[in-house]
Amino acid sequence: MADYRTIRTATGTSAAQIDEGLRSHMNKVYGTMSIGMLLTFAVAWAIGTSPELLGIFRDPATLQPNILGWIVMFAPLIMVFAFGAAINKLSAAGAQLFFFAFAAVMGLSLSWIFVAFTGFSIAQVFLVTSIAFAGLSLWGYTTKKDISGWGSFLIMGVIGLVVASIINIFLGSPAIMFAISILGVLIFAGLTAYDTQNIKNTYLQHAAHGDSEWMGKAAIMGALNLYLDFINMFMFLLQLLGNRE
């Protein structure tokens, strides 16, 4: 874990300057993530509450996706991999634009929830997720415990969830879906704390370099990671706690 005193000794940068820069960096991470969340739910609500628009992607009666619906469903996953591969070639402004485009596409893929679940239960689960996310992120930011070792196990868990979810698309087993949802909540709860600490430590390790372009892209990448943690935790909790229409 990065240490303020080490950075100050090596570079002459004061702890106060580092602390101020870190607060600014984290504010940009959370601010960008919040805008992405608002964009996602605005798009999802606009599509999900319009039978005509939703019908472009899914059967209005069964909610089964058509060809375009399948493309929209897997597009966010493809975009995440593309973003990771292209981040070094993008400017900070380009990375931010890509993130907002990703958030809008995610909204398209989630629009069906406004038909499948009651509006009250969506709002209720969103509130529960927000409280849980805030607590976990705050713990990850403030804890003195080094949780960097969680990363490899949590990523393996995510891969397992993706594989199990794809398989269950064809099996349609409620029992498997229940187990996936329980594990999903636990894994993304852990990732929320892990990613928050990682964003903080990454900033501290590069605090004295003064590379504003890198800092800007690092903030967007951090926002994307926390955004994915929130969205996935929300969706798994919705499967567990949501009241269906």
Image (cartoon, rainbow, N blue to C red):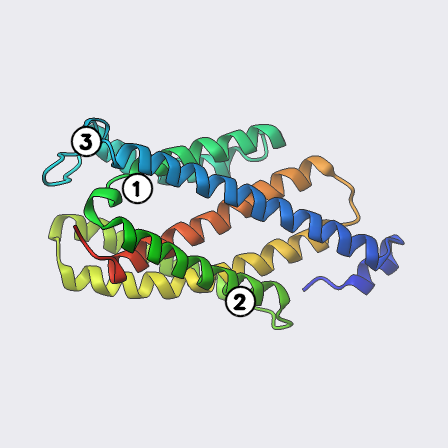
Q: Which mark is residue 51?
A: 3
Q: Residue furthest bottom?
A: 145
In terms of sequence position, does the residue under pointer 2 or pointer 1 come before the other? 1
Residue at 26 percent of width and 37 percent of height = 48
The furthest residue to the right: 12
Q: Are marks 1 and 3 in contact (CB under 8 Å)?
A: no
Task: Give residue 182's quadrant in the image.
Answer: bottom left
Question: Separation of disc 1 and disc 3 at Cα?
Answer: 14 Å
> Mark 2 to mark 3: distance in Å?
46 Å
Out of 178 and 52, give the one closest to the viewer: 52
Q: Is residue 89 above or below residue 210?
A: above
Any mark on residue 110, and which?
1
Residue 24 is labelled as none
Q: Position of 133 compared to 144: left or right?
A: left
Does label 1 or label 3 sit earlier along the sequence?
3
Q: Mark 2 or mark 1, which is nearer to you?
A: 1
Instruction: Look at 45% across and 57% down and name the residue there.
Output: 130
Q: Please, what is the three-letter code of the amino acid marked with disc 3?
A: Pro
**Other-residue count near label 3 (Cα within 10 Å), few / some / many at <14 / 14–19 / ≥20:** some
Q: Do residues under tags 2 and 1 come within 8 Å of each other at their CB atoms?
A: no
Give the residue drawn at x 65%, y 72%: 144
> Given this view, does label 2 or label 3 mark the residue nearer the observer?
3
Question: Marks 2 and 1, how far apart in space?
Answer: 32 Å
Query: Considering the numbered disc 3 on the image, is that residue within a helix, a strand or a loop?
Result: helix
- Of labels 1 and 3, the one closer to you: 3
**Secondary structure beneath label 2:** loop
Name the residue tied to disc 2: 149
> Label 2 is placed on what type of residue?
Gly
- In front: 142, or 75? 142
Say how many tags the image has.
3
Residue 12 at x, y percent in the picture: 89, 54
Q: Where, quadrant-wise, is the N terminus in this rendering?
A: bottom right
